[in-house]
Amino acid sequence: MSEAALDKVRIGIVSISDRASSGVYEDKGLPALQDWLTRALKNPIEFVPRLIPDEQAGISAALIELVDQQHCSLVLTTGGTGPAPRDVTPEATLAVADREMPGFGEQMRQISLHFVPTAILSRQVAVIRGQALIINLPGQPKAIAETLSGHEKASGIFAAVPYCVDLIGGPYLETRDEVCQAFRPKSAQRPRTA
């Protein structure tokens, strides 16, 4: 299969920060997400970015719009997952969910615990809405890459994302092994591109 034959994918990337969205400082979440995904995926990607404040109704509305109107198969958020009163990303995400996928949040915390003891304060969740997978990631670019790629003692969460997207009816995502090796059962694998 040539790279030209790979499925196109629309990915929503959402950075949630009161200060970045109001221009107090430069947002680093969207560039970090776009950079990692561009390196990890062989598929042609159309990014649909959003930079929004920590407002639960606004976060939920953005997620609904990205899935229902923009037809994103994958939506990754960054920010707003801690214990502070303004951290409402998990609540906003669960409010729009058809189903929760708790393994993603559990694994992200396991990975992060290899780097910082405060990983136990993280409340990231992942959900399915329609034919889209929505995952809350940490707020720091370094932590985003760590949770997606993994650690020598803990598999990164993105290894499971392509097969999950397959199972919910999304495009076939193919990864670059040097960044992240996707796992699929043999019965679900297509011939790989060069």
Image (cartoon, rainbow, N blue to C red):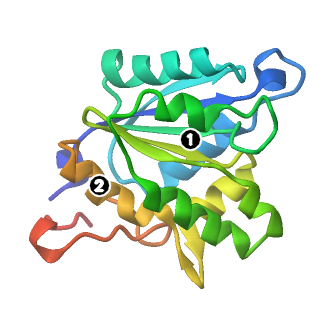
Residue 89 vs 42, above or below: the answer is above
User: In the rendered structure, which amino acid carries the disc numbered 1?
Assistant: Gln
Residue 158 x %, y %: 45, 60
Residues tagged 1 and 2 counted as in contact (Cβ below 8 A)? no
Q: Which mark is residue 26?
A: none
Residue 56 vs 165, above or below: the answer is above
Q: Secondary structure at mark 1?
A: helix
Farthest residue, direction bottom: 153
Residue located 72% across and 24% down the image: 54
Q: Residues within 10 Å of mark 1 (few under 14, many from 20)?
A: some
Side (left or right) of 67 relative to 167: right
Q: Quadrant of the C terminus?
A: bottom left
Work out whether residue 131 or residue 55 is closer to the camera in this orientation and state it.
Answer: 55
Work out whether residue 12 or residue 9 is closer to the camera in this orientation and state it.
Answer: 12
Work out whether residue 153 or residue 124 is closer to the camera in this orientation and state it.
Answer: 124
Side (left or right) of 108 relative to 97: right
Residue located 55% across and 28% down the image: 92
Residue under label 2, please give it.
164
| Residue 15 picture quarter | top right
The residues tagged by marks 1 and 2 sit, at their Cα atoms, a distance apart of 20 Å
Residue located 26% across and 32% down the image: 130
Numbered disc in front, either 1 or 2: 2
Q: Which mark is residue 34?
A: 1
Residue 109 x %, y %: 63, 64
Residue 131 x %, y %: 25, 36
Farthest residue, direction left: 187
User: In the rendered structure, which amino acid carries the disc numbered 2?
Assistant: Cys
Farthest residue, direction right: 24
Work out whether residue 69 or residue 174 is closer to the camera in this orientation and state it.
Answer: 69
Q: Secondary structure at mark 2?
A: helix
Residue 74 vs 194, above or below: the answer is above
